[in-house]
Image (cartoon, rainbow, N blue to C red):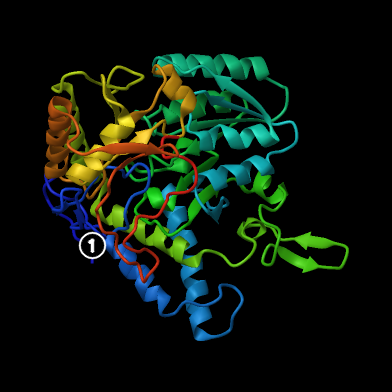
Amino acid sequence: MTQVQTTAAGRLLELVGGDLRVPLVDGTTARYVNLDNAASAPALAPVAAVVDELLEYYGSVHRGAGFASIVSTEAYTAAREVVRGFVGARDDDLVLFTRNTTDAFNLLAAALPPGTTVVTFAGEHHANLLPWRRHAQTVHLPIPSGPAEALAALDGELHRLGGRGPVLVSVTGASNVTGEVWPIEEIVAIAQRHGARVALDAAQLAAHRVLDVEAWGVDYVAFSGHKVYAPYGAGVLAGRADWLDAGRPHVAGGGAVRRVGVDDVEWATGPARHEGGTPAALGAVAIAAAVRTLDAAGWDAIVEHEEELLQRLLDGLDALPGLRTYTLWDRAPDRVGVVTFGVDGLDSALLAAALGAEHAIGVRDGSFCAHPLMEHFGGGPALRASIGVGTSADDIDRLLNALSDIINNGPRWTYVEADGYVLPSPDPRPRPSLGGLLGATPVVVAGAPCRT
């Protein structure tokens, strides 16, 4: 059952791990403060409950006659319709389940008609910059100093491109660096006037605001399950069917076909065309459970909760010496709970490591997969704190007090840099076993450094 509190000073919804206690390097433990929701949010408790229930009935989707397969198929089909309602899609739009927003935009990029030009802004997340470069002509508009400048630049570029083939305008709904909400309806109006389509990156918007593709006139929308408290490996692309039905299947394999011969294939249309292989049914159902829970909580309550905590955070950060926050539009009145900041004389990776190891606070350090935008702000990594439905006033105060302590006294532990990571050395914090996957000795982290 959804648990909702009536005051924005406390948690609005219950999260898995909301009362998690973690070890600190000094041998004590503390309640974990998760202020990294913009990167990947924990599961809502009702989402985990739905997934656990489905696991008992898990079976092959679209491929089995047994009762478990029937239940799994029905759940997967129902999840698609719940998501359709959540994004406000048109009746004839396709709703596809993908891995995440990046996967969704790569799918859409591969389905663009030949000769399509994609217009976007240079300050976008990499998921809305890189996929288009593989499949289309791309125009990167300069990072604007305000909404009016963004709209004027877009209008001018679309006028210049008039009559040169299909055009897709792809923009963020809310910045993953500054939290500023973009003027979506005005962007759509300009695009429609020039005969262009609009794709909306809603990765940072979907957990904070109502989406309404049909009312806005947006042609495509993408978001990730892990941003809306459903971290089970699925995402969404929803939008007009014509380009998607004509595009090359995203994953060639079983389920994406009507008939296969030795030398030929007849591909399916509709969602099946791009969902080859066994679908991520648990992820799709998790997304449906998450967005239903958010809808039930009420978007007015979600926005009120977030705005109260965001103002508390901004006021506290403004009072700290040597700290500056990053904004494009002079503290835009409409923004989601994402704040990026830097502290003079303190390396952001060291600061993030100290917050985690000494204060049990999780934040994001780096360039947030938005390198051009961070270069616009002067280059170099920074810190990001992000608010969610499980954030409380105590969480904000914990962060502000910890920042004040580190700024005034410095870190109290020793840290080393290794492969792009800053880690406590030594690190005596015991890890959970996870069924034997982890042991007492910390695992050497592999992959891209966290500062990207």
Crowding near the residue tagged with mark 1, few <14, some 14–19, many ≥20 C-alpha atoms within 10 Å: some
Q: Seen from this angle, which residue lies furthest front?
A: 426
- Asked whether 129 or 159 is in front, the reply is 129
Residue at 58% from the left image edge and 52% from the top image edge: 92
Asked if one can make out residue 443 in the rendered structure from this viewpoint, the answer is: yes
Q: Position of residue 77 (x, y in %)?
A: 51, 66
- Asked whether 354 or 19 is in front, the reply is 354
Q: Position of residue 377 (x, y in %)?
A: 39, 18
Q: Seen from this angle, which residue lies furthest right?
A: 263
- Where residue 346 sits, quadrant-wise, is top left
Q: Position of residue 88 (x, y in %)?
A: 44, 48
* Residue that carries the numbered disc 1 in the rendered image: 2
> Seen in the image, is 258 located left or right of residue 262?
left
Q: Helix or strand or loop: what does disc 1 sit on?
A: loop
> Seen in the image, is 84 located left or right of residue 245?
left
- Mark 1: which amino acid? Thr
- Asked whether 430 or 129 is in front, the reply is 430
Q: Position of residue 63 (x, y in %)?
A: 61, 76
> Seen in the image, is 319 located left or right of residue 41?
left
| Rendered-image quadrant of the C terminus | top left
